[in-house]
Image (cartoon, grey):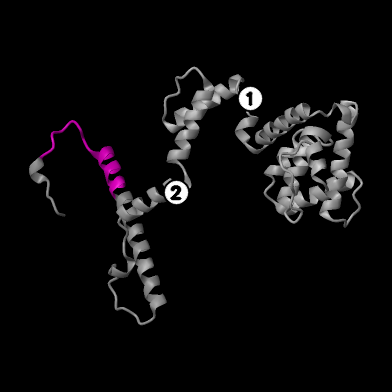
Amino acid sequence: MSRRKLRAVEYDRDYVNFDDDNEIRRLITTVEEVHLKHRDENWPSQMLDEPDTAKWTAELEKYFGEFGAPSGCSRAAAVDYVLNAAINKIYEQKGGDTELSSARLKAQAEKVLEAHRDSQNPLNRLDYSSPKFAENARALCSILGISAHHSDPKILMKAACLYISENLGDDVIAEETEEVLKEKKLLNIKDFPIGMEVTKNGAAHFSARILRLISLKQLREVSGMINETLVEIQNLTMDMSKKPDMKQVQYGR
């Protein structure tokens, strides 16, 4: 594969590392999106977004075969089949290589770069003029706690993106989590008394402390239920027409 073929398909690079399938995927999706249109319009973006290497590699092999590349051939040869098909289609559409002037090639190259940027950035695939986008942009700003009263939904989306990048990044969240854990007081189970002789078996001793804590939790829940029952009984049996004799009330029993 020559540099002239890459320039002929208006690719933004003049070299491809055939040992790197990610570079090959980038080239093939760009050529497919701009020139060949052999698959549906969502195929290039789906290929670029696919996280499973085995899946998109298998899809590449299938794609090469559709352009006549024999099974088991080298990556360079397979890509060459695709580029030849793209160049042939360009010549058919332009009426021959005489119309591929430098000015037109430059314009087409800029078009390829723009298309590639669109496919790489998911925000560029949004319809910023749709009412649904405006509604979702305002809803996102409301969730983030920032003003959602601006008339331009693109400004709202930009504000939301800036807020997320500055306040909800992985490094910011990690720092905030670390500060919360430092301030949070945790119970040291090793210092919790269990009311029994300490055994020499560490696992048994640790299990006894856990069971003791569970038992205390259950006792507190039962105590709360008993208190609630007593309150309900008092509400049902108390004669509200009589004035209570506070002298008969005894505390501590």
Answer whether residue 126 is visible to the viewer in this image. yes
- SS for tag 2? helix
Identity of the residue furthest to the top in this view: 151
The residue wearing badge 1 is 127
Residue type highlighted by circle 2? Asp
Q: Which residue is mark 2?
A: 171
Callout 2: 10 Å neighbours few (<14), some, many (20+)? few
Q: Which residues are magenta?
A: 227-245
Q: Residue at x 83, y 29 (%)?
A: 100
Of the numbered discs 2 and 1, the one sitting upstream in the chain is 1
Pick whichever, 80 or 41, lies toward us: 80
Between 164 and 15, the residue placed more toward the observer is 15
Please state if 6 lies on the left or on the right of 72 as rendered: left
- Vertically, is 222 above or below 31? below
Task: Please indicate whether residue 68 sits to the left or right of residue 128 in the image.
Answer: right
Residue in view at x 74 percent, y 47 percent: 15
Q: Is residue 189 above or below residue 90?
A: below
Residue 233 lies in the magenta-colored region: yes
Give residue 12's position: percent from left, percent from top: 71, 39
Disc tally is 2
Type of the residue with mark 1: Asp
Task: Residue at the far bottom: name it.
Answer: 200
Residue lying at 50% horizontally and 24% vertically, measured from the top left:
155
Quadrant that contains the C terminus: bottom left
Q: Secondary structure at mark 1?
A: loop
Residue 219, image x and y in percent? 32, 58
x, y percentage for residue 14? 74, 44
Q: CA distance from mark 2 to mark 1?
A: 31 Å
Task: Say whether residue 224 is magenta.
Answer: no
